Amino acid sequence: MESQTLTKAELDSVAQQKVQKLREVFADAPQIAKTALANLSQELTAHLSEPRSRMESAGRTGSRQGKVSELTLILTFAPGGARRLRALLQAQNGNFDGADKVGTLHDMRFVFLENDTKLLFATAYDGDWDAYIDDFATKIPDPMDAAFSAFEGWPGIANVQETKDWIAQHQVTAEGWYVASPDLTVAQTRKLEKVGKAVEEFLDQVG
Amino acid sequence: MASETMTRSDTEEAALAERFRKLHELYADAPEVGRVGLDKIIGDLKERVSGQQRATSAGRAGLRIGKVSELTLIADIKPAGARRMRALLDALGGNFQAADKVGTLHDMRFVFLENDTKVLFCTAYDGEWDPYIDDFATKIPDEMDVVFCNVEGWPGIRSPQIKDWIISKQHTADGWYVALPNQTVAKGRRLEKVGKAVDEFLDAVG
């Protein structure tokens, strides 16, 4: 069987073609962009022929880089919903310790948009979409209902299937997704923090 | 050592109590699942929420928890700008690897909104807003210009107006959670190496 792996020369050639195509698309871009692209051409070709990892799908929706995925929701508030959610967030005073229970959540933001008519909810999490939504539904169902009942059409987390459809419907998949350490899950980082501490203690003792 | 809840002052207590009272009142006409959800969590919230706001400002805009801050930016895309941005992201395989050079960037996303007329740019990063923007400007200026020249009003990364432009498009979050708030990107990378070294060491002695 013929090898499916491209040779280095073939990869370089593909990368060069991509950069050439980019130059064409950027032909009518502002001058600063064309200059910047020219400055970057060599580096881009090198990156493209040896990518560290490619963006993949996180499952039903969303993108993933290595082990870390993104979820981006744009939601419309129900009447009175924005006031309730803001009061709930203010009452928490920045304390989202409950979210630790999900175990796979790296970061999460709530951003009010368009005069409090919409909300951006964005998270970075480990693994696949389906399992992640299940984690929210089984580990923190009450905080989810308290917060998400602020939005039009929230079916209630107890209706897991409907909730998944609702989330997928409001999710917008990122077309660019970068993660500094794509192989580090939250669980692994917690473990490594302990290992790091143990190593320091060990070195202190032998030193 | 006294716990957070033990150190609440009387004024903090009163402010918290007032906040929870208002919260209850607002939820009176919430959908059933929301009202029930709040009833179930409010006891726990009252117990663990401190009178001290945990999130701080990341600087000019954005929230910060521990060492990790958020930046959320929404900008209008120029005509044909979406086509160029998408071609660029597509050529990169969605992987903006040059961002490694920034050194303080945890994660970053580009999301096209409203029929490609807007782009949402979200990042999680270490430290303060001002040096973070400086890092972008000094470490990956060309990358920034190639991407953001496609949005309306971009002054160019080397422009003295750049920070004011970013501020005018940035939306500070009302809620920001980070699982490992003391874990910087640099520390994460070091831990990965330590982990690998320990594994090799254990393999060697085992």
Image: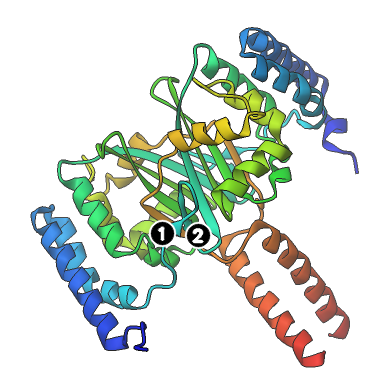
Tell me: B156 left or right of A123. left
Tell me: B152 left or right of A196. left
Tell me: A170 left or right of B206. left
Quarter of the picture containing the N terminus of chain A is: bottom left
Question: What residue appears at the point 51 percent right and 64 percent down from the top-left corner?
Answer: A66
Is label 2 or label 1 in front? 2
Q: Are marks 2 and 1 in contact (CB under 8 Å)?
A: yes
Out of A194 and A11, give the one closest to the viewer: A11
Residue, disc 2: B104
Quarter of the picture containing the C terminus of chain A is: bottom right
Out of A152 and B151, give the one closest to the viewer: A152
Q: Percent x, y for residue B75?
A: 30, 38
Disc 1 element:
helix
Q: Percent x, y for residue A110?
A: 53, 33
- Could you classify mark 2 by the number of other residues whose Cα lies within 10 Å: few (under 14), some (14-19), or many (20 or more)? many
- Disc 1 residue type (three-letter): Asp
Q: Percent x, y for residue A147?
A: 61, 26
Out of B86 and B7, give the one closest to the viewer: B86
Residue, disc 1: B135
Q: Which callout, 2 or 1, points at the residue further toward the start of the chain? A: 2
**Residue B168 in the image: above or below residue A204:** above
Out of B87 and B25, give the one closest to the viewer: B87
Q: Whole-Å distance between the Cαs marked 2 and 1?
A: 8 Å
**Residue B165 in the image: above or below residue B123:** above
Question: What residue appears at the point 71 percent right and 28 percent down from the top-left corner?
Answer: A142
Task: Write down the chain letter for disc 2.
Answer: B
**Residue A126 in the image: above or below residue A22:** above
Q: Quadrant of the rendered structure where residue A149 is?
A: top right
- Could you classify mark 1 by the number of other residues whose Cα lies within 10 Å: few (under 14), some (14-19), or many (20 or more)? some
Q: Is residue A33 visible?
A: yes
The residue furthest front is A1
